[in-house]
Amino acid sequence: MCPGHVSGTKMRGDMRLRDSTIIDYLRGNADDRLFAMADSLTRQVHGSEVFLRAIIEFSNVCDKHCHYCGLRAPNQDVSRYRLSPEAILQAAEAAALMGAGTIVLQSGDDISYTAATIGGLIREIKQRHPVAVTLSLGDRDLGDYAFWRRCGADRCLLKLESTDAFLYKRLRQGEYFAARLHRLEALRALGYEVGSGVIAGLPGTTLLHALRDIHFLTQLNLDMLAVGPFVPHPQTPMRDAAPGSVGLSQRITALLRLLNPHANIPATSALDALRPGSRGQALRRGCNVLMPSLTPEEHRKDYSIYPGKNDQGLDIAGSLALAVDTIIEHSLLPSNARGDAKRRPHAHQSATRSAPGHHPHGPSQCGQVLAD
Ligand code: SAH
Ligand code: SF4
């Protein structure tokens, strides 16, 4: 569907957002209004609480070749590390004792951690601490994910990165968008809370891509939505590409909030990498989650997905304290609750859910370029 047509996507209540309105907002023509609406809806549905999710980046080894990411396998200039299971449990314990209600286990796509090892970690963490466990481990086998669910894992994050299947294939060096989408849907069928999202402002994308990302993600009826701007990494093939913009990323997020009132939406660290302070600002622009890195200090800077990630030079207590301060600075309340998904009173997307490559906002139906 092209801008100017009335979109079928419904906001909470009776309001609808036209594609032309979304495009106007994406252009930044009414930022004050958009961000105020997103903040007001966030507070209405989620209150003043901001959930703290401690992220433990336990391995920066990756067998993938994503063109945008500093951890890609061919990058020989990154000092690779793998935390031992004991070190991961220690980090989880520290995070839980410091008040995180969710532990996010994230890594490169590193299959050296067997299903049994990860499963053992999940069981231990869940037995020892009253936390939710989120997995962000990439394209692992669905059989492994099924096993980890039985071990007690609660949630999975698997970003689609871009909902343009051609771009996805190019930027993820031959991987298939349909496979990623299938995995995401299968994770939901396994009983996980599921989250996804995109990288905003990838080179070659336009506002029409953003429009389609917004519709596509909304139609998936996700529990969590995460959008961060593209940050070029000097040791990748995209080193010379223009960075994404903080404004566009925040606008996409705010629009997703309007269309997904009940989703948990983090203020992502990539915002701060491009413009310090913009992650905190996003807490007043539709976000209700903050995910400080509680990766052990000696490895944190090597989890260099993009420059500026994890380089504040803080220890884990300092990293959590900074997150708490950021929340308070924006007159919000840090929360150590698990922050489980709020179920929607009316799931409005099921009738319009689309098959990959056939959704109504695809380039095949609307190929014009509006703006860069
Ligand atoms: N390997 C797993 C999880 C770690 S990557 C996976 O790929 O799913 C975590 C996220 O970092 C990715 O989903 C991607 O959205 C983000 N990312 C990677 N490189 C980036 C870059 N250059 N700019 C912004 N975000 C990036
Ligand atoms: Fe690996 Fe994830 Fe980076 Fe891709 S985005 S190279 S899968 S860590």
Image: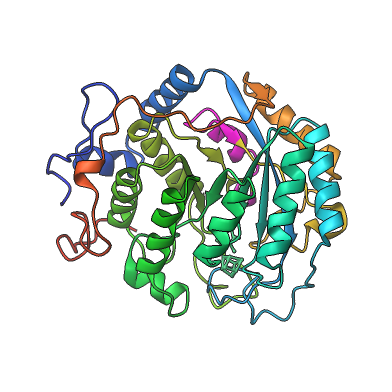
Q: Is residue 356 above or below residue 14?
A: below
Q: Nearer the viewer, residue 287 or 130?
A: 130
On whether residue 274 falls in the magenta region, the answer is yes
Q: Quadrant of residue 18?
A: top left
Point out residue 296 in the picture as x, y percentages from the top left corner.
84, 52
Instruction: Please give the name of the residue rendered at 68% of the width and 56% of the height, measured from the top-left corner.
Output: 119
Residue 20 is left or right of residue 115, and the answer is left
The answer to whether residue 369 is above or below residue 336 is below
- In this image, 370 relative to 283: left or right? left
Placement of 128 over or under 63, stated as above or below: above
The structure residue drawn at horizontal position 59% and vertical position 57%, both measured from the top left corner, is 147
Tell me the quarter of the picture where residue 64 sits: bottom right
Residue 362, given in percent of the width and then of the height, sits at 22, 60
Q: Nearer the viewer, residue 54 or 298?
A: 54
Q: Which residues are magenta?
A: 273-289
Task: Give x and y (percent) for residue 326.
Answer: 69, 30
Q: Is residue 176 visible?
A: yes
The quarter of the rendering in which ligand 1 is drawn is: bottom right
Q: Which residue is most to the left?
A: 5
Is residue 45 or residue 185 the one in the foreground? Answer: 185
Q: Position of residue 330 (x, y in %)?
A: 62, 23
Q: Residue at (50%, 37%) from the top-left corner?
A: 265
Residue 274 in view: no
Residue at position x 27%, y 29% from top?
11
Give the total of numbered labels. Answer: 0
Q: Answer above or below: position of 239 versus 124.
A: below
